[in-house]
């Protein structure tokens, strides 16, 4: 029997669906990935600036570390109001505006002269960037139903390892190539040059992004009706609709999601901040070689996270696709620091850890986006992201404390392993019928 033909299309239903989602993917996803690469780079390039900035401005390790963490305090407080504002003013205007804003704030770091100015700008940068990631996740739910979302979010989250692979060498090159040019230091040029893509992306977003399916002029009316029907059908079922902020903060599902995500982000930032140190302890001396070897775990993560995203969508199974990478990542952390003199074994374990924890991040978002809808989705995604990213403030402090107390990397990595394994246990508590769609 021939496949059914859509009344509004000359194509069979399956081919028409594939055509529509391919068009939506091409128009939206690559651009959002590029924007997230820029966002993540502007967030973490402070680590490279530290190589010169601390000495140049006389900042102690405590001053520098506290300022780096203050970013996540601003991020925490402004994520939720940003997503609610996006629902009111529209995704195009809001996302474009916050990208331009954080671009100018990032460039303003060239004027940092005191700890106070450093703290203020890091806080404001966190506040500005707070709305992009949860806003982008919410925006993807406008266009892709739950059964297609894990693969799309995995592709979107590929921006994190891509930023690690290309951003670190770029930052190092800028700082070396432009040092002392125009009476500015290399770290100042790095902030200025790497801020420009955010401003350009923000202006471009105003012309590329549409607030919703109905407002898009690059898809046909039959395609709009098809997408609207898919999203409407996706919104039915046992999903949470909340009508006030008090309902949101009293909802047990939302706080379970916050706890799971906090655990995953703890491991993610532990990996980001400590992987170069672990590689260095195996005997690798030069920064260039450490940087090149650090790219290997990120390359592994890109492959695994996208394969798992595809598999999760194809099987419409969410929990095991999240729990297994979490447990694998926990094992990688536990063993990575056990062979401090063996570069090959340590790098292999770090690759397993990176593939596990970075795969968890996009697959996690298939849970709350399946559980929440409407205003609950906008507020819930923002709250979960904000609470989860407080781990960016806690994780480096915890691992640093454990290292100072024990003079070993092992205990910090063991702590990350336990936390990540705990996240798998929490995922097990989520009823499969609520998220396997």
Image (cartoon, grey):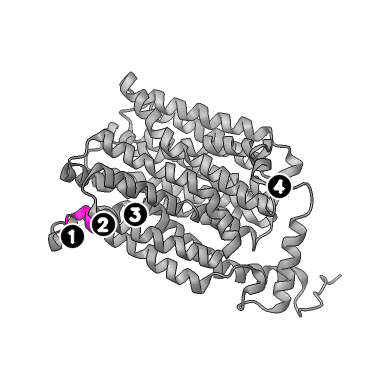
**In percent of the image, x 30 and y 28: which residue is there?**
341
List the residue tagged with mark 3: 167
The numbered mark, 2 or 3, whose residue comes first in the sequence reads 3
List the residue tagged with mark 4: 242
User: Badge 3, how many Cα within 10 Å: few under 14, some, many 20+?
Assistant: many
The numbered mark, 3 or 1, whose residue comes first in the sequence reads 3
Figure check: 276 above or below 152: above
Horizontal and vertical percent for residue 163? 39, 53
List the residue tagged with mark 1: 178
Tag 2 near tag 1, CB within 8 Å: yes
Between label 1 and label 4, give the one nearer the viewer.
4
**Which region shows up in magenta?**
184-190
11 within the magenta span: no
Between label 3 and label 1, give the one nearer the viewer.
1
The numbered mark, 1 or 4, whose residue comes first in the sequence reads 1
List the residue tagged with mark 2: 190
Distance (Cα) linking label 2 and label 1: 8 Å
The numbered mark, 2 or 4, whose residue comes first in the sequence reads 2
- On the image, which quarter does residue 188 sit in? bottom left
Figure check: 83 above or below 396: below
User: Badge 1, how many Cα within 10 Å: few under 14, some, many 20+?
Assistant: some
């Amino acid at each position: 029997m021939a496949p059914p033909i859509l009344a509004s299309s000359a194509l069979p239903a399956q081919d028409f669906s594939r055509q529509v989602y391919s068009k939506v993917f091409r128009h939206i996803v690559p651009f959002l990935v590029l924007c997230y690469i820029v966002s993540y780079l502007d967030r973490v390039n402070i680590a490279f600036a530290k190589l010169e900035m601390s000495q140049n401005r006389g900042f102690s390790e405590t001053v520098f570390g506290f300022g780096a963490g203050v970013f996540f305090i601003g991020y925490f407080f402004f994520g939720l109001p940003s997503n609610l504002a996006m629902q009111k003013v529209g995704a195009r205007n809001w996302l474009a505006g916050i990208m331009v804003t954080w671009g100018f704030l990032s460039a303003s770091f060239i004027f940092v002269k005191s700890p106070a100015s450093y703290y203020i700008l890091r806080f404001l940068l966190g506040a500005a960037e707070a709305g992009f990631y949860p806003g982008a996740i919410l925006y993807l739910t406008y266009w892709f139903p739950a059964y297609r979302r894990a693969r799309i979010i995995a592709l979107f989250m590929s921006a994190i390892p891509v930023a690690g692979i290309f951003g670190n060498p770029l930052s190092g090159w800028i700082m070396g190539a432009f040092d002392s040019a125009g009476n500015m230091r290399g770290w100042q040029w790095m902030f200025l040059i790497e801020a420009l893509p955010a401003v350009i992306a923000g202006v471009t977003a105003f012309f590329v992004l549409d607030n919703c399916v109905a407002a898009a002029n690059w898809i046909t009316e039959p395609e709009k009706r098809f997408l609207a029907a898919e999203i409407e059908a996706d919104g039915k079922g046992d999903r949470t609709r909340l009508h006030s902020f008090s309902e949101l903060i009293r909802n047990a599902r939302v706080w379970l999601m916050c706890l799971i995500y906090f655990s995953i982000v703890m491991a993610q930032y532990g990996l980001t901040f400590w992987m170069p140190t672990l590689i260095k302890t195996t005997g690798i001396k030069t920064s260039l070689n450490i940087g090149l070897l650090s790219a290997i775990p990120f390359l592994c993560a890109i492959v695994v996270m996208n394969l798992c995203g595809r598999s999760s969508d194809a099987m419409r199974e969410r929990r095991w696709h999240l729990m297994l990478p979490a447990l694998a990542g926990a094992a990688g952390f536990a063993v990575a620091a056990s062979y401090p003199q063996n570069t090959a074994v340590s790098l292999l374990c770090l690759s397993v850890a990176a593939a596990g924890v970075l795969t968890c991040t996009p697959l996690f978002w298939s849970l709350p986006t399946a559980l929440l809808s409407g205003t609950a989705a906008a507020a819930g995604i923002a709250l979960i992201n904000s609470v989860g990213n407080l781990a960016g403030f806690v994780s480096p402090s915890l691992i640093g404390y454990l290292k100072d107390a024990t003079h070993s990397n092992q205990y910090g990595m063991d702590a990350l392993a336990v936390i990540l394994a705990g996240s798998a246990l929490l995922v097990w508590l989520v009823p499969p019928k609520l998220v396997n769609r």
